[in-house]
Image (cartoon, rainbow, N blue to C red):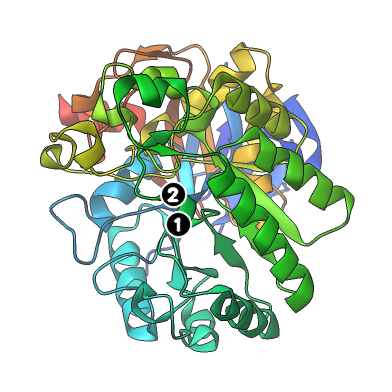
Amino acid sequence: MKKKKDISILGGRVIDPANGLDEIIDLHISGGKILALGEPPDGFQASVTIDAGDQVVCPGLIDLSANLREPGAEHKATIASETLAAASSGITTICCTPDTYPVIDTPAVVGQIRHKARKAGYCRLLPQGALTQALKGDRLSEMAALKAAGCIAVTNTYTPLANTLVQRRAMEYASTFDLLIILRPEDHHLNNNGCAHEGKVADRLGLPGIPEAAETVAVARDLALAETTGAVIHFHALSSASAARTMAWAKREGRRVSADVAIHQLHLGELDIEGFDSNHHVRPPLRSDGDREGLRDAVAKDVIQAICSDHQPHEADAKASPFPDTEPGISGLETLLPLTLKLVDQGVLDLSSAIARLTSGPADILGLPLGRLTPKHPADICIFDPNQRWVVDKERFLSAGKNTPFSGWEMPARVTHTLLKGRLVYSQNRYEKDAS
């Protein structure tokens, strides 16, 4: 094994929200870990230096939810393609969802996925295990074995459980092993195969609607079951202001609960589906302007402490049918950071808080010592140039999924370097030179 290089990152604006740091300072790396900030220790001599002048240096980003499609749907994307896209976007840790083929419900599948991620080498991959066997919703998975194999949490994604008794038993089992349960709050009866937010826009377009209550009813139910069982739960991809208000109440009550929001929910709304563009078909659906503002407020107040990509890459045919028949989801890895920084431009968040929602916020949800630039911690680092503005061109995505509603949007900031455990896994200059 090659010895990891000693690296100095010089002259950057280092922002580390977890440690309250925001200043222009040098950063030094040795043995894959943060060695020091400021002056290097006596005798340290970097073999590689990175000039970060006029750039921001922050912890590597952590994405709480991405579907990488492999194994089983490699025609959509692969672990190699999507982790490269992540690295190019400053993301050093990804939590991948278990709805693969086969489902991530055995240690063997966990091992296969982790091996492929290590072989690709671009990103730390943390699998989510299936809450029930084959995600069928009735028989519980072997959660203890999944945790031992490396699963960071368990979830049933959007597959409904057979009934609330199964959900209670699952929470009791998970709490026994102090295993985080990730819930996508949705009452599938109220969802009723809808594809848009229930309201005037859906009515005008003749699209079947999903009421806000489909989410709020599920949030209330899950909070009650979590209190009964002592489970630690995380709500993934909240879409409504009402659910965000319930989260604020739960936090005031001291409940063991956290939440994230997909970045597209903070920028888009139900009016964006007017043209029947299937790239706006997502689940949960894009909701009202009031919901978007409520979510933004919850993110600003740290009620929702993480922003994720909810990455769902698709091949072109998956989005080529009439709107209700297309597969929901956005290819979101490469727009996660710039869309979050747009919230800074719009006055929703200050820069440190925006970075916190992508670093220390998700790390704390997972209970991991990541998302910070603390000496002796892994040197997972994102460097971006806040002055590089660019226009989204889906054909230039490194992700195999080109399904984005943000084509043509002007974005702030571009990632120039990404380091994973002190190893340079992405360099903008090197990649652009190779691609030319």
Query: Are there few (<14), some (14-19), or many (20+) residues within 10 Å of tag 2?
Result: many
**Amino acid type indicated by mark 1:** His
The quadrant of the picture occupied by the N terminus is: bottom left
Tag 2–tag 1 contact (CB < 8 Å): yes
Q: Nearer the viewer, residue 210 or 304?
A: 210
In percent of the image, x 44 and y 78: which residue is there? 132
Q: Is residue 39 above or below residue 157?
A: above
In percent of the image, x 21 and y 51: which residue is there? 77
Q: Position of residue 309 (x, y in %)?
A: 45, 40
Q: Position of residue 246 (x, y in %)?
A: 75, 45
- Disc 2 is placed on an element classified as helix
Q: Nearer the viewer, residue 122 or 9?
A: 122
**Amino acid type indicated by mark 2:** Asn
Q: Which residue lies under the disc numbered 2? A: 191
**Residue 188 numbered tag:** 1
Q: Position of residue 281 (x, y in %)?
A: 32, 34
The quadrant of the picture occupied by the C terminus is: top left
Corner quadrant of residue 401: top left
Q: Is residue 64 above or below residue 57?
A: below
Corner quadrant of residue 102: bottom left
- Disc 1 is placed on an element classified as helix
Left or right: where does residue 88 sit relative to residue 403? right
